Image (cartoon, rainbow, N blue to C red):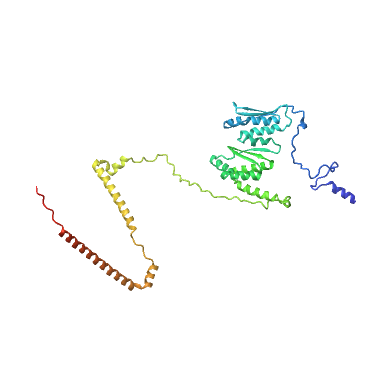
Amino acid sequence: MEMGEQEKEVQYNAQGKRKGKHDKPKPWDTPDIDHWKVEPFQPTWNEGGLLEESSFCTLFPQYREKYLQDVWPVVTKTLKEHGIACKLNLVEGSMTVSTTRKTRDPYIIIKARDLIKLLSRSVPAPQALKILDDEMQCDIIKIGNMIRNKERFVKRRQRLLGPNGATLKAIELLTGCYMLVQGNTVAAMGSFKGLKAVRRIVEDCIRNVHPIYHIKALMIKRELAKDPELADQNWDRFLPKFKKKNVKQKKAQQKEKKPYTPFPPPQQPSKIDLQLESGEYFLSAERKAAKKWQEKQEKQGDKALENKRKREAAFVPPKESKKRKKDALSNGGPSEMAAEGIKAKDIARKLKGKVEGLKQVKLAKSVEIESFLAAPRKRKD
């Protein structure tokens, strides 16, 4: 009985699924084997080559024509090593890649297709040629049709770059991917895991979610990955949770609709009509000039009074505060202040007397000098 129960337990695995009789131990499948590792392609795996020719073609903008002409020999040489033929058509503005009889790797044509796509999206040739490696993947994210307003699109696209490209550099370091924001697309190169994070950041940025939130989460994840104890745990409790704030927008002021009338509004009086009503139209030219002069004089008079008031305002003494009055009373009261006023009057009287004395001395000196001077003699002819 016990043996039968043990057999039943063996027949079901941890997920509750029934095991078959063909599930046998595999001694060659050890835990140190990395099942996700991509081994480099060996030409001996496909010595016969490909049966059919495959080709891909893509267009490029006119401003890339000069650059592609310069780097095309390098691109041709690199693709020739993998058995891929390439052609640059400047008349149509297109690039074409195709397999040849020497092609052994069947997937290299897909890599060549990605290469010409990256070259057409302004990725430099040295960087784009790295896509031919097995561990390197690429993703071209289209962002042009995600938002209609052009100004808003340009503003949000600029958030991906940040001040002096700081945000773009941070995303590249955290995801391990190369990024290039160009026109209506974002070209990215890296691993599958990094490309998935880059696509999410770019799409959320255009949908008005700032990249800084994703950058913070990626920095926390990188630190948590260093701890082996947290490898099998859920990290949601460590990640920041940002709440959306509903910012109240100013409502546009709606103008009150006037009641509809089928008749047009009354015609406004012209300048001549107003002159006729006031009687100014019948005045002579001299009277009109005199009236204008009078109005001008009145305006000037009003302005002069206002300027005079402003100048005099600077000489108006400020009102004494209660604190100053209390200090004056505490220092000696009104009796001392009166005594000081009497002293000042005596000093002013003495000074006045001295000035009058000096004037008399000057007059006396002038008289003495004139008495010594001889009168001029008359000239005899």
For residue 373, which quarter of the picture? bottom left
Relative placement, left or right, of 20 versus 131 is right
Is residue 211 at least partly visible in the picture? Answer: yes
Q: Nearer the viewer, residue 42 or 206?
A: 42
Q: Which residue is at a point 33% across and 56% down the rendered structure image? A: 311
Q: Is residue 55 above or below residue 319?
A: above
Q: Is residue 8 above or below residue 330?
A: above
Q: Which residue is at a point 65% across and 49% down the rendered structure image? A: 219
Q: Residue furthest front?
A: 380
Relative placement, left or right, of 345 versus 246 is left
Q: Nearer the viewer, residue 339 or 13?
A: 339
List x then y, in percent, for residue 249.
53, 48
For residue 318, which quarter of the picture? bottom left
Relative placement, left or right, of 129 versus 12 is left
Relative placement, left or right, of 8 versus 60 is right
List x then y, in percent, for residue 134.
71, 37
List x then y, in percent, for residue 7.
87, 48
For residue 94, which quarter of the picture? top right
Q: Nearer the viewer, residue 88 or 249?
A: 88
List x then y, in percent, for residue 336.
33, 73
Q: Which residue is at a point 65% across and 48% down the rendered structure image? A: 218
Is residue 143 at least partly visible in the picture? Answer: no
Q: Which residue is at a point 67% across and 36% down the rendered structure image? A: 131
Q: Is residue 101 above or below residue 270?
A: above
Q: Residue furthest left?
A: 381
- Figure disc tally: 0
